[in-house]
Amino acid sequence: MGSAFSGKVVLITGAAAGIGKATAQAFAAEGARLILADIDTSNGEATVAAIREQGGDAVFCQCNVADAAQVQSMLEMIERDYGRLDCAFNNAGVEFEQDKLADGDETVFDRIMDVNVKGVWQCMRFEIPLMLKSGGGAIVNTASIAALGAAPKMSIYAASKHAVLGLTRSAAVEYGFRGIRINAVCPAVIDTDMYRRAVEAEPRKAESVARLHPIGRIGRAEEVAAAVLYLCSDAASFTTGIALPVDGGSTCI
């Protein structure tokens, strides 16, 4: 195992699968002490068990990030048990819709906004005070390339991710002078369970989706994890308020 984050206390939401799980494994390999949060207890605890089997330090916390009381309780637990929070990856999110705007559903809108936007806001508003107590830290929020332009038939999802960038950039300016760096990663299509469910519904999409990326394929969760670790590392000490595409070149075209 490496030591770039040895002893650092790191919170990851949406950690039970996909990008969150890959990022947890990457942080664990670099010596971090992990709190992994998700609503999926079974897969969350399995991720913790796998990390511990490799000699890592991780605990699971069931948490719905859209629920203020649950987020507050989780951060109080972190302060009580660890005394600090060095890094946070606010990654929990829900699937995009597949309808044109006028065909949208209010229930879907509320769910996407509750998790993707309110959830990030809830996490940051409880993470930041704890980071301030120990002199600073680094936060990374999961946005999307849908936050960097138009996303036909995904307008609600795109709006939620534009909002994540608004929260990220505004908070970066508010807290930069106090030692907290806040950035966002903007993945393109990544090989996760969410992507596979979408392809199962329309199998012919797989080939056309790959062609959207000049690199010739969709991304891997580990590639997003590498970007998150960079943004949380000392190597990015002068980097804050950015939206980092991890997109195989798709935003170039």
Image: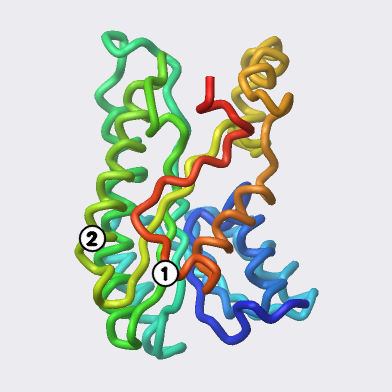
Q: Residues within 10 Å of mark 1 (few under 14, many from 20)?
A: many
Q: Which disc is residue 173 wearing?
A: 2
Q: x, y percentage for residue 235?
A: 55, 69
Residue at figure coordinates x 23%, y 60% from the top left:
173
Residue at figure coordinates x 66%, y 13% from the top left:
208
Q: x, y percentage for residue 139?
A: 40, 64
Looking at the image, the residue that sits furthest to the front is 238
Camera-nearest residue between 208 and 203:
208
Q: Amino acid at mark 1?
A: Ala
Residue at figure coordinates x 54%, y 39% from the top left:
187
The picture quadrant where one finds residue 196 is top right
Q: x, y percentage for residue 227?
A: 58, 54
Residue 109 versus residue 114 in the image, above or below: above
Total marks placed:
2
Q: Which disc is residue 138 wearing?
A: 1
The picture quadrant where one finds residue 34 is bottom right
Q: Amino acid at mark 2?
A: Val
Q: Residues within 10 Å of mark 2 (few under 14, many from 20)?
A: some
Q: Which tag, 1 or 2, sits closer to the chain's start?
A: 1
In this rendering, does residue 111 appear at all?
no
Which secondary structure, mark 2? helix
Instruction: Tell me if 82 is positioned left or right of 116 in this view.
Output: right
Instruction: Tell me if 150 is positioned left or right of 60 in this view.
Output: left
Position of the N terminus, as image quadrant, is bottom right
Gap in angstroms between the C-alphas marked 1 and 2:
13 Å
Camera-nearest residue between 159 and 63:
159
The picture quadrant where one finds residue 80 is bottom left
